[in-house]
Image: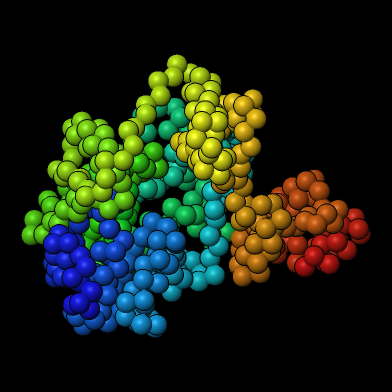
Amino acid sequence: MQELLTSLNDPQRGAVETVSGPVMIIAGAGSGKTRVITYRTAYLIKEAGAPPKHILALTFTNRAAGEMRERVEHLLGEGATRGLWIGTFHSNFARLLRMHAAEIGYTNEFSIYDSEDSQKVIKEAMKELNISTDQFTPNSMQSRISMAKNKFILPEQYARNVSDYAEEKTAIVYRRYTERLRRNNAMDFDDLLIKPIELFQSKQNVLEFYQNRFEYLMIDEYQDTNKAQYIVAKLLAEKHRNICVVGDDAQSIYSWRGAEISNILSFQQDYPEAKVFRLEENYRSTKNILKISNAVIKKNKEQLEKTLFTNNPAGEAITLIDAQSEKQEAEKVSMAIRNMKLTQGRMNKDFAIFYRTNAQSRALEDSLKFQGIAYQIFGGVSFYKRREVKDVVAYLRFLLNEQDEDSLLRIINVPARGVGETTIEKLRMLAATEGVPFYDVVRQIVRYDFPPRVVSSLNDFR
């Protein structure tokens, strides 16, 4: 292991070898951040003697988690990470909640709703509450509720602090939405962050167990953590204070979904004894790219001081396009591609266009078509968002969790079996009148006044 550390620069090595107490690694773009986290994890296991099961590593993507595990095993050997909790906030805490769901009023088979499922429940809640979906779209309502959860604002607190009509209606929907999720024995993605906090705050013995279990805590992309992630990390690190955060305030882009840049800016206030390592050498970019990015970053009023540098060549000059509209911008981009193809012999596969939002693709597509440039768009509908896949997943979820009414409603007439909206509404009213779960009515369909065809279909379905 010591031989491997010689390949690191001084700040990288210092960050790897400092394993006790709070550590903040300010990792500029292209500065070898993943390598440092990987080596630090391996160093904890190999040199500091930390059992893998005492390490919790939190990332923001499954891909990053998989890459970290793979690299650590490459350094230490296959099986070296057995027992290590490494994954996204959501996956790690979903795993934890599966073991302790009963302590906060759920069963271990609770369903996890994605954004589309969540929006569907919100729409149903709005319908029950007679709140017009023309005045407030389910999407906007979902965004406000999600933002509240990311800030760890629960329904009661939200209702106490409403300041306008939209928030007043959101508070009502938020409460009903929460009730429906609990009734369905379901959580949404945001719940996977706030339910562990509720668990830890209400069950001190569970918190102490995980504080002792996770003696070492590492968090990647700390600049993108929200209030809920900040609270749960602080609770877990409270006993041993061996928390290592890695991030770069200049790369924070997720404030629109609740990320709080103050988490990384105030880390040293939370942990005054923290050791700080600045990774400033960039291994990826040219001098020209770093020169312009440093000039932009220096305009930030609040920041963690750092200056990126590189030993790479100067590279090509940066070209800035000044456009008055999205159409003109698209025309200039496609013309630039066309000119390079004609004058430099470039091919279509030599180019990539990155844009910030999906709405920007339309103008670019129109312009590329006009220039006769073939293109391919990446990032269309996710496999797991395809209708038929979500239908199959709904079947599986309902098999595990018969309280999941929304999964039941999705599959009750898929494939079509003659159970229309009128029948579903009548079933729903019977369940509400008798105070029983929706599926109990389906189970005992022969007791009720339904046409023989519907009774036969629902019995076959059951």
Q: Position of residue 57 (x, y in %)?
A: 32, 67
Q: Quadrant of the C terminus?
A: bottom right
Q: Is residue 296 above or below residue 215?
A: above
Q: Position of residue 301 (x, y in %)?
A: 18, 32
**Which quarter of the figure has residue 374?**
top right
Residue ranking furthest to the left: 273
Q: Quadrant of the N terminus?
A: bottom left
Q: Residue at x 36, y 76 (%)?
A: 74
Q: Is residue 102 above or below residue 339?
A: below
44 or 36, nearer to the observer: 36
Q: Is residue 200 left or right of residue 114?
A: left
Q: Residue at x 56, y 44 (%)?
A: 349
Q: Position of residue 414 (x, y in %)?
A: 77, 56
Residue 239: in sight, yes or no?
no
156 or 123, nearer to the observer: 123
Q: Is residue 369 left or right of residue 162?
A: right
Residue 291: in sight, yes or no?
yes
Tally the marks: 0
Q: Is residue 32 left or right of residue 171?
A: left
113 or 440, nearer to the observer: 113
Q: How is the image coloured?
A: rainbow
Q: Residue at x 12, y 51 (%)?
A: 269
Residue ranking furthest to the top: 324
Q: Position of residue 266 (x, y in %)?
A: 17, 47
**Which quarter of the figure has residue 314?**
top left
